[in-house]
Amino acid sequence: MTQSGYDTAEEAYSNPSVNIHATLELRPEIGSLTQVVYNATDYLAADKAELRVAEQKADQLQILATESGGWNLTDMPEWLDVSENHGGQGTLGTVTFRLKDGYQGTEEAPSTITLRSNSLKMSVKVYPYDENIIEYETPYVRKVWQAADFGYAEEKFVPGGSLVFIQDRYLLFANNYNAVTDGTLTSFPCILIYDMEQQQVAERLSEWTFEGQTLSFRGTSDKLDLIDDLAVDEQTNRLYVMRRQSCVEVFDISDPTRPAYVTRIGKLFESGAYTRNRLSGSGAMLATTQYLLLRDNISLDTYLRKDIVSEKFQEITCVTRDNQKMTHSDYHPTQWAVDPTDGNIYMTEYDNSFKGIYSFDLSKADSYVQSGKYWQQQDLRSRALPLTYQPTGLLITDKKVYVTRLDGSLDIFSRKILESAPAVRTFAPVEKAENIRLRTTTGKFGKLQKIYLDPNDTESFWSIDITNHTLVQLNMFKSSIEIQP
């Protein structure tokens, strides 16, 4: 109900108050401890109601309680580390809050902790990042493997395809060197199997036999072949080798030093015709629990791993093929990645209509497999995460997402890039305003194509420098700058 007040100040002063209610809060003054809960006898006090922690930056909270039993902290988030979680009566305590090792602040949600003292309590908000902190990660070259390390002259060493680590000991990659002399092909690609323990090449795979015929990675003088990608299925010890000439060679590498040939997917040199066995300009592969995924220049093919056997040489049929929306011209470097936290699958992609990362839902192919159907047109993409540039390589860890660009530079993202689109950078680079260029030990900029996690060191990464024709091991130098408001 609304009522009018008195007409004049004199009337209001001379008459009793009507409909006026006030609450008087009594609390002691405790210096810098401005956050106080008081029950007319005892109090619980702190110097702030919000805390901000980040990598390499802690925050502190001063606490004082006058009730018997002192104070304690509860409702602590998993990512937060504290120097003390309780204190005595009447003693000023200082608690240091830090981000735990292994946690990335920008990937954790803010949390509210509770400060208690018997019947008294107050809430303190903790933010796992600080807007005034800019964090930097700069790659530096820790190790370089070049031609001489693998027994080659510099002009005859063209590392490519991808890097595959197996048994935490062997490194596999392609030497894509081709040579034509007087119209005759005199050198062609091979796969190097390098023993990292012995620090020597254990095998150079270039030719092999199958049903009485000699096979190789040999192209022709007018149509050179290249190895575009390697993938390993360690459950079955299979090595898959993607060739530019429209096929995938499959080997058994139970003994990595003695690869045994299994079969071929697709038909060699059949890139000119649109057939069921065409894998023109193959770009990337991924072996999952049930499937082998092949990305080529016209489609994304889904093969059942159990169908990839010697008896079906060149006639292995895919379960699904997306040839309506995945077509582009020429060869595009592409890389698959599996999220180690949930097993979700992603792939870089760029064409005239899209630049970014796709996520995939393989369950869309399961119904066809269960009903025995093959050669079905099916779009397995579930989400699109656009970028403003052409991405080539992709690596996902439990902390970050690493993306190489077509220009050979590297972007480092928070994992939030996988949650929504468009993606937002959260880690500022050093070299340029948008991304990071790799400066080699000679001072010459390198050009990275694809990126891989070191199996023996989760803080190290590997890539192929396609400008300098070297393999590089990268570490990340972490630093931060605090901006004073």
Image: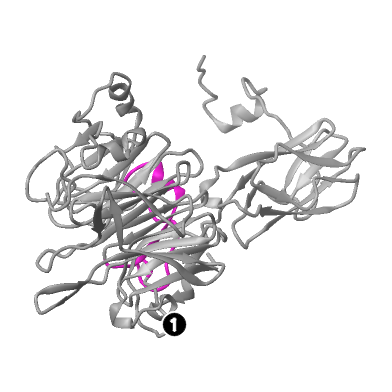
Counting from the top left corner in percent of width and height, residue 130 is at 55, 56
Residue where numbered disc 1 is placed? 441
Q: Is disc 1 surrounded by few (<14), some (14 to 19) or many (20+) residues within 10 Å? A: few
Residue located farthest toward the front when viewing the structure as drawn: 212
Identify residue type, mark 1. Answer: Thr
Please say whether residue 226 is one of the residues in the magenta stretch: no
Q: Which of the 4 image quadrants contains residue 393?
A: bottom left
Residue 482 in view of the camera: no
Q: Is residue 119 above or below residue 354?
A: above
Q: Which residues are magenta?
A: 407-436
Counting from the top left corner in percent of width and height, residue 19 is at 61, 20
Residue located farthest toward the left when viewing the structure as drawn: 273
> Relative to 470, is 376 on the left or the right?
left
Residue 313 in view of the camera: yes
Residue lying at 92% horizontally and 38% vertically, measured from the top left: 68
In this view, the residue in front, 445 or 157, is 157
Counting from the top left corner in percent of width and height, residue 435 is at 36, 66
In this view, the residue in front, 449 or 173, is 173
